[in-house]
Amino acid sequence: MDDLGYFGPQSVTWRLHADPMQWVGGIRALLLMALHPLAMAGVAQHSTYREDPFGRLQRTGAYVGAVTFGTRAEAERAAAKVRGLHRRVRGVEPESGTPYRATDPELLLWVHCGEIDSFLTIGRRAGVRVSAADADRYVAEQVTAAELIGIPRERAPASVAELAHYFERARPTLRVTGPARDVAKFMLVPPMPALVQLATPARVVWGSAAGLAFASLPRWARRLYGLPGLPTTDLGASVTLRSLRAASWMLPAALREPPAYRAAKERMARTPVRRLTLVSPARSGRPVPG
């Protein structure tokens, strides 16, 4: 049963994280993360996002994929590697002079909560069928992911209400620093080779995804960034996400599905366990026989 990983094919985590629109969720999570001055300082001073923005996002996606869809051993190896990297990340936030270290459970909790809120928000807005009970179950499932990265289990939100309460508690500590503004601009207009911009739709596709990520942020976060906080922004983001998700089903599975999810499906096909239910991010959002 180790092959099923920490969550397994019947989890809400599989249903949400396998959805093709979650790359927008990853951008949204980064924008939320940047609002915490100490977390943003760690990224600005120790990350290679400026030199290799797409590689940075790809590595983050690979980590989430390993923890979500990998075996328990694969998830633990991925988490141990990230914890090791975090031990070397420390410094001082320049605008306030406040020291930080990436192993601080409060900073880890901010990043964790931004990720699960983003994946849940983008999935539901894009049309994944997630009931209120499913949403609570997802947040509770993700307590395991929090613990793997070094957050004490009892400190991680275990329901949507607890997640909302956490954000209310954290909001007074948030602000848009100079590095956060740089990240926001960078995410909207990242550098691309001239040939990629001219010969492919990469610039348009990325700009659309980044715009959706901004538009789907909580209104308080958009106001911090100086962006409109109107209800029409929320509606427009939801309509566009649903349309893009519907269009994504025209793509082959190799382009639509995360690599770790495809590997997990292949692993499930080889496992001796019978009659598993494989949760597919199909248009209906319902489980299909695996």
Image (cartoon, rainbow, N blue to C red):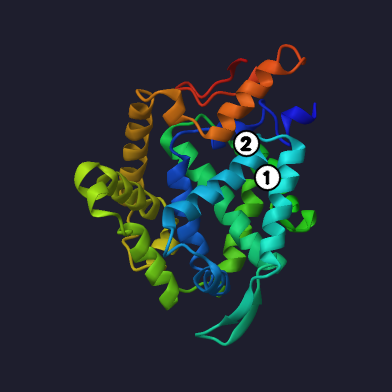
Residue under the image location 58 percent in, 48 percent down: 116
**Which residue is under mark 1?**
142
**Which amino acid lies under the numbered mark 1 shown in the image of this protein?**
Gln
Instruction: Say above or below: 6 vs 165.
Output: above
**Which amino acid lies under the numbered mark 2 shown in the image of this protein?**
Thr
170 and 152: which is toward the camera: 152
Q: Quadrant of the C terminus?
A: top right
**Which residue is under mark 2?**
13
Relative to 182, is 87 on the left or the right? right
Instruction: Say above or below: 181 vs 94.
Output: above
Residue under the image location 46 percent in, 62 percent down: 49
Q: x, y (%) of residue 171? A: 54, 68
Q: Residues within 10 Å of mark 1 (few under 14, many from 20)?
A: many
Q: x, y (%) of residue 125? A: 43, 39
Q: x, y (%) of residue 22? A: 47, 41
Residue under the image location 37 percent in, 59 percent down: 187
Q: CA distance from mark 1 to mark 2?
A: 8 Å
- Say if mark 1 contacts mark 2, CB within 8 Å: yes
Relative to 57, is 289 on the left or the right? right
Res. 168 visible in picture: yes
Identify the residue at the far left of this view. Answer: 198
Marks counted in the figure total 2
